[in-house]
Amino acid sequence: MGELKKRIITGVCVAPVIAVLFYILPPVWLLALLLAIAVVALLEAASLAGCSMKYLLAVLVIAGVAPLYFRFFQIYMLWMMASAFIIIAIKVFDRKASSEDANRDLTGQTAVVLFCNFFILIPFFYLYLLKELQALFPLILLFSIWASDIFAYGIGKKFGKHPLAPRISPKKTIEGLMGATLGSLIVITASHQLLGLSVPAALGVGAATGVLGQAGDLLESACKRVFNTKDSSQLIPGHGGILDRIDSFIFTAPFLYTCLVWTRYL
């Protein structure tokens, strides 16, 4: 079975389930679902980096949701620093590894903790905040990302001639980026009344969401190139791993939440 066929079949089977869960789950239960997904993504990231303490890293990152949930943001920042300190302390007393291995492992695991906080936990927490604002908001963002991906693939496949970032992702084109922007723009603009945005504001937010989704995709592609791998895992047939599917939320979830909150005060 070809990769495109696998991708379509998996999408048809999984997408409706994800959409329903994003809509029907109360905010706290959506957060619990997102944390479960985050754990898998964290383990993928740790495996890519060759970390020896991947389960400890997952615990350290996921524990950060407690201060975030209670809005203790300063404590959250302290916890991130404490997480790095814990890793350093463990490595200082590890006498088994060689000097080169110890340095590589310490650097890699500290980087993974910080990366996973900023690019997995925080975006997922913003999805939870969107759900707190209004039940439909995370679903609208999800649809905008899906539309962005579909338009990027379709337009890029048919019209793509100008590489966007060949050293990072050779298959991405400027035309594909325009398609991604258009797909997100259509969904956000069509939902402008539900989002509480004017049409001009929705056009701007939609276009920016499409661009930011592609930026998250490029960031994840760059990480995979560092580790010489095509997909973060083979968990989802035709789609790769969890990291490959959530990268579009990295910048879009915080951005959309901030825009929607600002419109309520302006």
Image: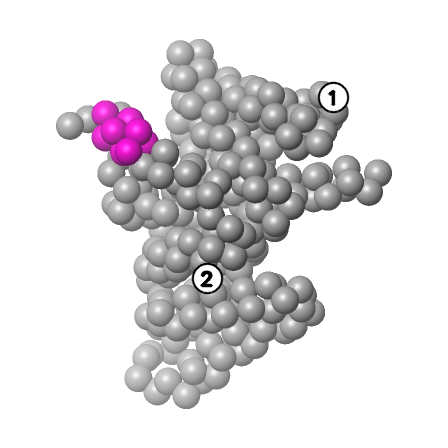
Q: Residue furthest left?
A: 1
Viewport quadrant of the N terminus: top left
> Mark 1 = which residue?
200
| Residue located at (47% from left, 65% from top) | 62
Residue 155 lies, in percent from the top left, at 45, 15
Q: Residues within 10 Å of mark 2 (few under 14, many from 20)?
A: many
Viewport quadrant of the C terminus: top right
Q: Is residue 71 above or below residue 127?
A: below
Q: Quadrant of residue 13?
A: top left
Q: Residue furthest top?
A: 159
Residue 194 lies, in percent from the top left, at 64, 30
| Secondary structure that dominates the magenta span | helix
Residue 249 or residue 15, whichever sits in front = 15
**Residue 119 seen:** no
Is residue 173 rendered to the left or right of residue 96? right
Q: Is residue 7 magenta?
A: yes
Q: Is residue 98 above or below residue 115?
A: below
> Disc 2 marks which amino acid?
Val
Residue 209 lies, in percent from the top left, at 60, 32
**Residue 175 seen:** yes
Q: Is residue 167 above or below residue 39?
A: above
> Mark 2 = which residue?
112
Nearer the viewer's eye, disc 1 or disc 2?
1
How many marks the image carries: the answer is 2
Quick one: SS at disc 2? helix
| Residue located at (64% from left, 45% from top) | 133
Q: What residue range appears in magenta?
A: 5-13
